[in-house]
Image: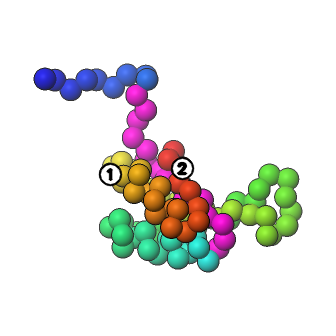
Amino acid sequence: MSARPLTDEQPEPATRHLLILPDRDAAEDAAQEVVDRFGLSEEPQVVREALAGEDDAEDAQWLVVIEDPEATLAVPALDAFAAEYDGWHEAG
């Protein structure tokens, strides 16, 4: 049995993951924990993202940006990890 070649219908593996979290504390804690839990070589970047049209600092999401150039991180595991911090995961 030979492996099927990739087609336009099959998505390429994600090389960047975003954990979208509700506040800065959760994002900073998750950024530290994700290094140990997933064996990352460096701590991911934490970024504040204001919601569209909102000026209030309370109306912001915090992103933990995880670079995964080898596409080795398991999406279901990252989904579950983000949920532990009351957030969600997006692969990109």
Does dot 2 land on a helix, a strand or a loop? strand
SS label for mark 1:
loop
Q: Is residue 92 above or below residue 61?
A: above
Tell me where residue 48 appears, x and y as whole percent: 68, 65
Give the image location of residue 60, x and y in percent.
74, 63
As measured in the structure, the alpha-carbon distance from the residue carrying label 1 to the one carrying label 2 is 15 Å
Amino acid identity at mark 2? Glu
Which residue does the image show at 75% across and 60% down from the upper left?
A: 50
Magenta residues, start to end: 10-24
Can you identify the residue that label 2 sits on? 90
Q: Could you classify mark 2 by the number of other residues whose Cα lies within 10 Å: few (under 14), some (14-19), or many (20 or more)? A: some
Q: Give the residue type at disc 1.
A: Thr
| Count of marks placed on residues | 2
Q: Nearer the viewer, residue 27 or 42?
A: 27
Considering only order in the chain, which callout, 2 or 1, is on the residue closer to the N terminus?
Answer: 1
Comparing labels 1 and 2, the label whose residue is closer to the camera: 2
Task: Judge from the rendering whether residue 55 lies leftward or rightward of residue 13; answer left or right.
Answer: right
Residue at 36% x, 70% y is: 37
Q: Which quadrant of the figure has residue 39? A: bottom left
